[in-house]
Image (tube, grey):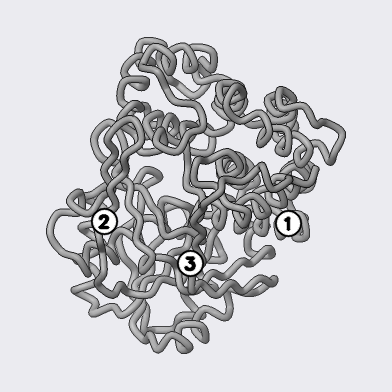
Amino acid sequence: MTPGPSSFPAAFQAHSSLTRVVFRPGAVDEAGAELERLGARRPLLLASRRSRTMSPYGRLVDALGDRAAQSVDVPSHSSVDTVERVARDIAAHGADCLVAFGGGSVIDTAKAAALLLAEGGDLARHATRFTPPDAVHVPALRRAKLPILAVPLTASGAEMTPSFGIAHGPGKLLFRDERCACRVVLLDPALNAEVPARIVLDTGMNGLAHCLEGLYSRQRSPYATALALDGLARFAAALPAVAERPGDVAARGELLVAANLAGLVLASARSCLHHALCHVLGSRCGVAHGAANAVMLPHVADYNLPAAGAELAMAAAALSAGSETRPEAVARCLRALRQAVGAPSRLRDLGVAAEALPEVARHALGERGLALNPRRVAGGDELRQLLEAAW
């Protein structure tokens, strides 16, 4: 379905970046040369404990040479403490750039550390602030930041957005700084074929959510819509292909491209209620972000039906290769895709206690994503009922 002019708001904002993307098998071997292009000579390398054990990590270390130093292991839900430790490592090494090898948590930690080092003070002071129902204040962050080179291992698309989140208390601190956008992204499908399929399949549901929310966000634009529709179609094809053929480099490449497009959508249109709930489920209940996305996607799509019918009809067409054009079909398409890739379908299966749902709902009311959701959230009871349906 081709959207008509009436699908778009009369006024919109769109964002581009200075990010250079290199896509090819073996792209990781160009890391050293890409840093030379940036004029960077003392990289600090960030990764999780698990990803450091992967053979591609050794290839990246070799490509960077003996100039690179390694920072602390980044956990799956990075914290302010981790960011502060990385900032201290930057100073101790005299690093002039950061290299992030991993998923959204590692890449977001690199962005946050670059911000903290440049802006100083407490990290939380630089976070965006949300005042219900729709007021969002983004601090002016004008100082130059260290360049970041990212080698993404997951399908979240974090490498393409200047936004990032860091766990803090029951929720996440959310930031936006155009100067924190990654300067170089190396998309290596051959390297990705060595990442466990379960990781990229679950995080692919997160990338898919970026496209879906970008379609109906109150900050959507013609650019975001075009990228989101292409991204949804690519995810719908690539996720089952990776599930069926985990070692297929071509399928991994298609998934990486879909995630990359999703990151561009998020950079321009930002996120909505779906991510607000997933952020709190992650920080409060310890749920992996990709798994939370897989569970919540169809429920939030149904919740937004009354306010985003036209956009969800476009999503249904993209997800079904044109066989579905009814907005209510989106949830069914998402459930079928979730089943095809073996992603989780219930919060209880992720270890979320039923007793935690009211608190998750209450804290989600303070999340920035509510500001751009097409359907206004009336209160905590609505969110609690939504979470109970997903439990």
Q: Which structural element holds mark 1?
A: helix
Of the numbered discs in the image, which one, if any, rests on residue 224?
Answer: none
- Residue 198 percent coordinates (x, y): 62, 41
Q: Nearer the viewer, residue 232 or 242?
A: 232
Compared with residue 381, is residue 100 higher up or lower down, i.e. above or below? below
Of the numbered discs in the image, which one, if any, rests on residue 150?
Answer: 3
Residue ID at (24%, 77%): 93
245 on left or right of 389: right
Q: Amino acid at mark 3?
A: Ala
- Residue 142 percent coordinates (x, y): 26, 69
Disc 3 crowd rating (10 Å Cα; few below 14, some 14-19, many 20+) is: many
* Residue 205 visible in the displayed image: no
Q: Which structural element holds mark 3?
A: strand
The residue where tag 2 is placed is 83
- Please identify the quarter of the rendering in which residue 119 is found: bottom left
Question: Marks 3/1: CA distance?
Answer: 18 Å
- Residue 281 percent coordinates (x, y): 40, 29
- Please identify the quarter of the rendering in which residue 333 is found: top right
Question: Marks 1/2: CA distance?
Answer: 32 Å
The residue where tag 1 is placed is 254
Please report whichever mark, 3 or 1, sits nearer to the chain's N-terminal start.
Answer: 3
- Please identify the quarter of the rendering in which residue 366 is found: top left
* Residue 188 visible in the displayed image: yes
Disc 2 crowd rating (10 Å Cα; few below 14, some 14-19, many 20+) is: many
Compared with residue 331, is residue 127 higher up or lower down, i.e. above or below? below
Q: Amino acid at mark 1?
A: Glu
- Residue 180 percent coordinates (x, y): 37, 65
Residue ID at (34%, 34%): 367
Please report whichever mark, 3 or 2, sits nearer to the chain's N-terminal start.
Answer: 2
Question: In the rendered picture of this protein, how many numbered marks are placed on residues?
Answer: 3
